Amino acid sequence: MNTRKTYAGIDSSYANADTSKIILIPVPYDGTSTWGKGSDKGPEAFLHASENMEIYDIETDTEVYKQGIHLTEAITEKSSPGAMVAAVHTAVKENIKRNKFVTLFGGEHSVSIGAIRAFDECFDDLTVLHIDAHADLRKEYDGSKYNHACALYEANENTNLIQVGIRSMDASEKPVMNENNVFFAQDMNADDYWMDNAVDLMTDNVYITLDLDALDPSIMPATGTPEPGGLLWYETLEFLKKVFEEKNVVGFDIVELCPNETDKSSDFLAAKLYYKMLSYKFASKDASDENENLYGNKSKNKINKLKYDQHEE
């Protein structure tokens, strides 16, 4: 259970489950990681850092928390990887049907499988933007298709998957990888147009799954599998801002924070990154518009149909 009452210590009037436009679901799961353990402690470290973060964003001149951010109870299902994925899927889909902008903080990357599945069921022509050091395209690993190394296999099969920042993978992943949709870190370093090219490959509706090891260890050392040669802070923000401005981002997750007891900089980076992404999403939104369709007109009919189907059940 969450020990805190609200996200970032915001006033409870901005954290009500019914009136908040944004839902934050913590998923402290670390059941399949194979090297650095500790991502189950990531959500708590992220939330603690968020409580000590300034909640006015200079760049967008906004206070996005005023849109309402409801922090749910953590999903603590740990009986099996499949059960965890199912629990995440159920929670995410229920909140999409309520016209909430759903976000998650993991936990290892396998928590994204259930979230992506829910968004894919709710949105036509979904693009999954996968920002990561690792391809995560194994069909099965260590006897489970819900291993963190398999986090994007299902998305690769069912959605328009765009992978950014990849610099580590197994040879077995190459046959299933759509290399035309992959931006390898070594190529991005010499390509001034990779951001535009990546956005051009996206459909209108985009879900973002961001593994913090996509970032360079010089600014984000606290991950389970840090890889040299990653993204830096301002280029990451430049890319994310472009995506939010040009596409309809329908939700996102951030995963793989493995907090360090003696260095809290990674916790604060994760907290700031989450808030930045929300600030980009709602920069031009009116907090007083209670009837706003958060997912855009192109998604409205399908969400309404989901609500109708749920009622009929």
Image (spheres, helix red, strand yellow):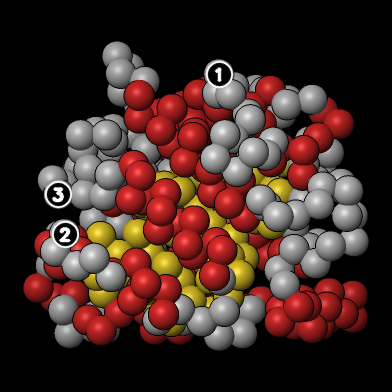
Viewer-side label of 1, 2: 2
Element marked by disc 2: loop
* Marks 3 & 2, CB-CB < 8 Å contact: yes
Disc 3 versus disc 2: distance between alpha carbons? 9 Å
Residue 8 pos. (x, y %): 64, 27
* Quarter in which the C terminus is drawn: bottom right
What is the x, y in percent for residue 279? 61, 46
Quarter assignment of residue 148: bottom left
Circle number at residue 87: none
For image coordinates 63% across by 29% down, the residue present is 55
**89 relative to 74, above or below:** below
Disc number placed over residue 229 in the picture, else none: 3
Between residue 203 and residue 93, name the one nearer to us: 203
Label 3 or label 2, whichever comes before in sequence order? 2
Chain-order first, disc 1 or disc 2: 1
Classify 10 Å Cα crowding around label 3: few (below 14), some (14-19), many (20 and above): some
> Can residue 292 be seen?
yes
Q: Residue at x 30, y 79 (%)?
A: 181
Q: Give the structural element (helix, strand or loop) at label 1.
A: loop
Residue beneath the point at 24% across and 65% down: 192
| Number of the label disc, if any, that sits on residue 189 | 2
Query: Residue flagged by tag 3: what amino acid is it?
Result: Gly
Percent across and percent down for residue 73 are 67, 38
**Three-letter amino acid code at the position of disc 1:** Asn
Please report whichever mark, 1 or 3, sits nearer to the chain's N-terminal start: 1
Q: Are marks 1 and 2 in contact (CB under 8 Å)?
A: no
Q: Secondary structure at mark 3?
A: loop
